[in-house]
Structures are given as C-alpha cells and as structure tokens.
Amino acid sequence: MTALLPGLPPSLPILGGGIALLLLCIAWRRSEARAILIALATLLLAFASLWWPLLPWPGDPTGMLFVPDGWFTYIAALILLSSAATMIMAWRETGTSSDEFYLLLLLGTLGALVMAGSADMVIFFLGLETLSLSLLGLIAWHRTHPTADEAAIKYLILAGLSSAILLFGLALSYAESGSLRFAAPSLDGQEGPALPLAATALVLTGLFFKLSAVPFHTWLPDVMEGAPTPVASFIAVTSKIALFAALARYFAGADLLRPDAAGTELAIVAVLSMFGGNLLALGQSNLKRLLAGSSIAHVGYLLLALLSPGPFGLASAAVYLAAYAAATSGAFAALGGASVPADIAGWRGMFRRRPALALAMAIMLISLAGIPPAIGFFAKTYIVIAGVSARRIVLLVALVASSIIGLYYYLNVVRAMMEPLPEEHRAARGTPANAGLIAILAIVTVLAGLFPETLVRQTHSLLQPTPIMRQASLRPAAPHDILYRE
C-alpha cells in the first residue's frame, strides 16, 4: 500500500485493518470486551507505527496525497492517545456499551489522521467527512436521552452546511491554482486577488464551523450536552486537534505576518473566540456546556500561536495542543467517573465524598485556566512568548483579558467541590480503568508542567511541511523554521 501511495503513513492502513477486523468480529459474535481490546490494540499498533521507517518516495513529491512529516507524527500521536482515552472512558459506561460504539470511534480516528496528514484537497475532504459521519452516530448514541436527537440534528444540519461551504471554497481554490494541493492559494494570481480571497474565506468559514470558533460556535454547547460524556471528549479534543493541524498545514506556505484579508480574518476570529468562549462558559451551570465554552476559548489561543510565525509559533501551538488534550480529556474522564449530575451543584462537597477524584478534577481545571504548576501555565506562557516575538499586541491583550475571565468559572468549580455539605452524600464510583486514566492524566499534567523540557524538545524537532511538497528528502528544521518560512 505504501508503494502504491507514496508517503502513506503506516498508521492509516493499520487503522483500516483494525476497522475491518472489528467488523468481522461483530458479524461473527458480539462481545464488548473483545471489541474494545481490538480497538485499543489497533490504536496502540498505529501509535507504534508512527516511528517506523518509511519507504522512499518515488517520483515527483508534489503529487503526494499525504505528508508524513514531523508535524503529522506529533499530531497523530496526540490523536491516537486521545482516542484511546475516549475508549477507556466509554468502557462500561451506561448507554455506550456496544461493539458499534468502538467501531465508530475507530472510524472517527481514521478520519482525523487522514485530515492531519493530507496534502490533497480531495483526501482532506474525505477524512473530514469520515470524521463527521462517525460523530453523527456517536452524538445520537443515547437513544433514550431527551437531548440526544436534538444534538444530532443540530450537528447534522450545521455539519452539512459547513462542509458545503468548505467544498465550494476548495473548488474555487482549484479553479484559481489548477492544483489539488491542500494549501492557501496565492493572492498574486493572474486573475487578481478576488478569486483566491473568496476561496480562502470560504475554506476558513467551513473550518471555523468545524472548530466551533466564534461566531460559528453556537452548536457546540448543545451538541456536547446531548452527547455521551466520552463522545463530548472526542469532539472537544480529537476532532479539534485534527482540524487545527489541517488549518496550520493549509497556511504552511503563507506569510501570516503580512497584513492581508486572511490574516485579518484569523485575528478577528481569534479575539472573538477568546472572549466569546470564556463569556459563554461564565454563565453555565452544566459542566459539559462549561467545557464547551472553554474549548471555544482555547481555539482562540491556538489561533494566536498560528498567527505568530517565527521562533516559537508552531512549537507553542504544539505544546498547547498537548496540554489542552491532557487537561480536557482528564476533565471529561473525571466527569464520567463521578457518576453524579453534570451540573456544578452535583459536585458540591466532592473533596469530602471522593477527595482523589476532586483533586484530579481541580488539577485539570487549573491547567485549563493556566495556573502553575500544571502544564497549562507553561503552554499559555509559551504562546505569549510567540505573540511577543511576532508583535501581536492586540491579540496578547485579548488573551490576558479573556484568561482573567476564565479564572472565575474554572475556580468556581473548585470552590464548589470544597464546600461542606449539610449531610453526607454517597457518590458512585466509576470503573477501575477510568480511575487509572484519570490518575495518569493528572500526573502527566503536573509533571509536564514541572519538567516541560522533553515536550519542548519534541516540538522543536518537528519538520517543515512546505519544502516536502517540493523536494523528496526529509530534513530537520531549525526551531525558527518550523512549518513557517521567514
């Protein structure tokens, strides 16, 4: 397969083989235990394959469908680990116990990986739709849940609309450039800037819908509230990592420091997402909706890193994605393991009822808030450094101001967990696997914040995607040469 498709990462056929095997096992005899074992083994094997040597790339590399560079390897590792965490959350959770549930999760993971590594418009769109269709089934999984059908219908309509807008933008980009390469069209074309500007605007609109960036965010809180908790985690973490990776690759060859329409649109959406997401979460009493608002705000922070090319731009985004994935996955795991209502009131007195779970949830929330010693503090500081190096003063002011707003609702949940209860309440306990997942994510969040050198070293060893389109050999990039060209 790799010989037929030059540059095809081995993780993709491994995931495809795991999906086929799971389908055969479901057709033969149903077993949830066997289904999750096959799914987790497939994810672990795909994770190990990220460091397997690739076959040489024959022919002209500009015709490649996939770019298995360092950026893809890093993003794919985050996607596979986040998907594995989602499966562990779903194990024996009420309403998600079924073979097909893990099959859809594998399909969604495959679509996310295709998006992260695609160098071709058609391949990118196929990956996007694979992810979207699997999410549709996962969101509506709770057939008896009163809001599941509403969430699924909202996602179906808006996902279809955003896909149509995105596809129209890709078609205009092809009409302008004559190439299917997944990259922002040049504004210096012979026909003038109107066509490439329209193409870029439509592609960005479609991607912003999928990323739930403001003002295209209104669907996310309703969908995450109606979806099962593991699916909400999958939407907030895995799908957003893949979408941001694709957005960064789309602008890999563009100079985002130049004042043009695309950079202005990205900057406006970044500011709106920072404030809009935090203000949305500020008034929420439901933890799922609160984390949805938090997720929107973090999209804005990541857009600041994207708009700060230079010594720290992509590296800061990569560190932030890892910090966000660990903290958000841990928060949803704690939410699912608590077996209490998702309202903040249900978490009152949790430090008395289940102190270990409450401590883990507090660690995740202070990491999302950017409070030391959790990794979220270092990740946000890293983005600030990137913004300062690129002189993004307005965006930096927005980041600081919106982060102050975010402190209130994150610490409000911690305060509720510390409140004494008038009488003792018993809290049901989750599965041992979920408890182990929460403990691991909490430890990683703290240790990565205390010792971030290893993570920073990994992000600075990423390779530059743009030259790979033009030359057949991979080359290490200096820290200031990651993804962007000066």
Image: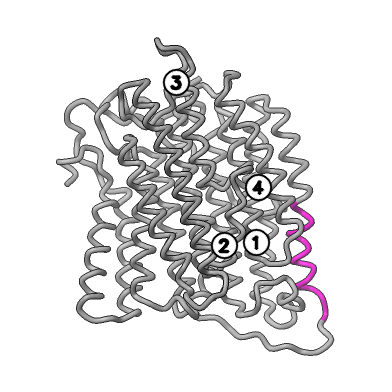
Q: Where does label 4 land, which residue?
A: 297
The crowding category of the residue bearing disc 1, from other C-alpha atoms within 10 Å (few below 14, some 14 to 19, many at least 20), is many
Nearer to us of marks 2 and 4 is: 2
Quick one: 338 or 196, which is closer to the camera?
Answer: 196
- Stretch in magenta: 406-420
Relative to 140, 127 lies left or right: left
Answer yes or no: do the residues labelled 3 and 4 have beta carbons within 8 Å? no
Colour scheme shown: one colour
The crowding category of the residue bearing disc 3, from other C-alpha atoms within 10 Å (few below 14, some 14 to 19, many at least 20), is many
Residue drawn at (35%, 47%) of the image: 127
Answer yes or no: do the residues labelled 2 and 3 have beta carbons within 8 Å? no
Quick one: 472 or 237, which is closer to the camera?
Answer: 237
Mark-to-mark CA distance, 3 and 1: 38 Å
Q: Position of residue 414 (x, y in %)?
A: 75, 66
Mark closest to the chain's N terminus, 3 or 1: 3
Mark closest to the chain's N terminus, 2 or 4: 2
Mark-to-mark CA distance, 4 and 1: 13 Å
Q: Check the image and name the residue furthest to the top.
A: 190
Q: Where does label 1 land, which residue?
A: 289
Mark closest to the chain's N terminus, 3 or 4: 3
Amino acid type for the residue under numbered disc 1:
Arg
Q: Where does label 2 land, which residue?
A: 224
Amino acid type for the residue under numbered disc 4:
Ala
